[in-house]
Image (cartoon, rainbow, N blue to C red):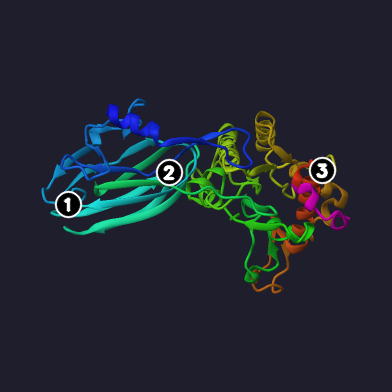
Amino acid sequence: MIGLCVGFSLLFATILIPGQALAEKQLAAPLRFDFGPGDVADGYTQVTAKDAYTPERGYGFTDLSKVNEENRGGSDAIRSDFVRVQGSSFVVNLPPADYTLSLIAGDTSGNTDITVKAESIVKVEPTAKTAGQFVEAAFELALIDGQLELYFSGNEAKINALVITPKGARTAGEHPSVYLAGDSTVQTYKSSMKPQAGWGQMIAPFFTDETIFVNRSIGGRSTKTFLVQGRLDDILRNIRPGDYLFIQFGHNDAAINNQERYVSPADYKVYLKTYIQGATQRGAVPVLITPVGRRDYDAASASFRISFPEYVQAMKETASETGVALVDLSQLSVAYYDTLGLEGTLPLFLHLEPGVYSAFPDGVKDDTHFQEYGAEQIARLVAQGVRDLNIPLSSYVKAENLQ
């Protein structure tokens, strides 16, 4: 184990990633693990069912009661033995970066049934193999928290080998790309859904042609489900130094009756900081955007209410605590609605008569989602907010289109 710790230390080199204020350590060569009690393949570190994780070791299983091992014998050091995991995690201390992971799982003499989650994201779907067959899977992962966690489950999850390879650093483009992480109020809709639209699909005309918008927003997602479904991971594996990540959630985080989506305001802040950390680690610039207001009118005051106020406040606190730029779309949108009044806001939202649009044959009265005109007006407010931030991206806003 002492030799491995020395080996781990030699794999790290300090480099400065463009766009980051501080130097970070990065893995300089692949890590190779050979699981099982038999012979160890050349260049690999052996992992047995007795190797519990410790900070000093830097790798290991979190629950040895759910781990055992077998050696079938034979000349293939990788495939002749394995560790069987019955619902436990294997963790490895790694610097935050982007990696390719290659996994071999199988048994020369018995069946294999395995599912693999990396950082709570399903990376290997449930897969079954018969005796002598092996799962050979490779996938990419953007690691944020400095410790890789692989969770193995299935009826016969048998692990032979794991190789972790660092990916090369990405370089900044001549102009920034802007990635959007959000929910149904932001997403881009297919033409078959007209006239429904999200502000993310309408925002490009408010910026110069050099700016590329990549809208990864999708309906029904909270900060939690967007992450565990691998959507943030997909963004982080593509975002470059100098790019931007716009983050607008809250509508589904507040859905307390849906525990899959629900995130408490306190946990909402934790998730937001994960998005922020992932972007800044890769030299990108996160921008928090408070959840856009619903059409929630208070007749007594003749004004519109702030939607999801606890989440708006939590996002503002997160911006203050992290120093991240924030566009208060909640306030901007509600102030805009107030200029229009209750009836005047109807053209913004999905209030449609029956028989007009094929996507809504029975009509609809929706005070959350937007028609194309409404999405365009919300996008204008976002662009206005970006201009007022006075960050490098502000210079790409077309001021003449904000009128």
Q: CA distance from mark 1 to mark 2?
A: 32 Å
Q: Residues within 10 Å of mark 2 (few under 14, many from 20)?
A: some
Amino acid type at mark 2:
Ser
Q: Which mark is residue 76?
A: 1
Query: What SS does tag 1 mark?
Result: loop
Amino acid type at mark 3:
Asp
Q: Which residues are magenta?
A: 393-403
Q: Are marks 1 and 3 in contact (CB under 8 Å)?
A: no
On the rendered structure, is 67 left or right of 26? left
Query: What SS does tag 2 mark?
Result: loop
Q: Position of residue 394 (x, y in %)?
A: 78, 47
Residue 77 shows up from this direction:
yes
On the rendered structure, is 146 left or right of 78? right
Residue at which label 2 appears: 120
User: How many numbered discs?
Assistant: 3
Image quarter where the N terminus lies is: top left
Amino acid type at mark 1:
Asp
Q: Position of residue 193 (x, y in %)?
A: 64, 68
Q: Decide: is 302 above or below 355.
A: above
Q: Which residue corresponds to the image point at 74% horizontal and 63% vertical from the top-left?
A: 372
Residue at which label 3 appears: 388
Q: Residues within 10 Å of mark 3 (few under 14, many from 20)?
A: few
Q: Which residue corresponds to the image point at 62% horizontal and 38% vertical from the top-left?
A: 20
Q: CA distance from mark 2 to mark 3?
A: 37 Å
Q: Which residue corresponds to the image point at 75% horizontal and 45% vertical from the top-left?
A: 392
* Dot placed on the residue nearer the N-terminal end, 1 or 3: 1
